[in-house]
Image (spheres, grey):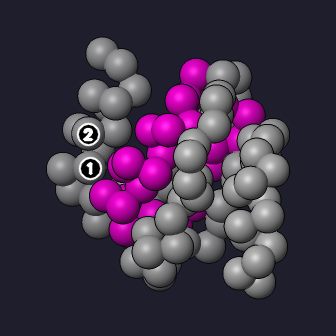
Amino acid sequence: MNLRDILSALSCNPELLQVLDVSGNNGRVPAVTVPNIIHLFTGLKELNLGGCLIGTVPGPLIPCEALERMSQLRELDISQYKVSDPAQRSGEEKY
């Protein structure tokens, strides 16, 4: 069973999942997975991806639309994820 299968299974009842912590799995989560599945977990209060993301994404790691739907999110940890320069500039232009 791979990470995508696990996350798909968890997404069957997304409102029940309040904490998702996959930190410490150094380089185990492809960053491109996050924007494709994050919209499924609207009930999250805590999301910890610290130290586990590998690679880059062509757009935002967590799209604004997904964040807007995650109204209960209180803690987000994406530490140790290196944002690419174009993504950084895009974020700076918006704020």
- Residue carrying label 2: 8
**Based on the displayed image, in which of its 4 quarters is residue 2 positioned?**
top left
The residue most toward the top is 1
* Residue 42 shown left or right of residue 64 in the figure: left
Is residue 40 among the parts visible in the rendering? yes
Is 47 included in the stretch rendered in magenta? yes
For the image, the number of numbered tags is 2
Q: Which residue is drawn at 28% across and 28% down?
A: 5
Residue type, mark 1 in image: Ser
- Residue carrying label 1: 11
Is residue 21 among the parts visible in the rendering? no
Q: Which residue is drawn at 37% across and 68% down?
A: 42
Q: Quarter of the image for the N terminus: give it.
A: top left
Q: Which residue is drawn at 71% across and 67% down?
A: 90
Residue type, mark 2 in image: Ser
Q: 19 or 60, which lies in front?
A: 60
Q: What stretch is highlighted in magenta?
A: 28-52
- Label 2 and label 1: CA atoms lie apart by 5 Å
Q: 55 or 58, which lies in front?
A: 58
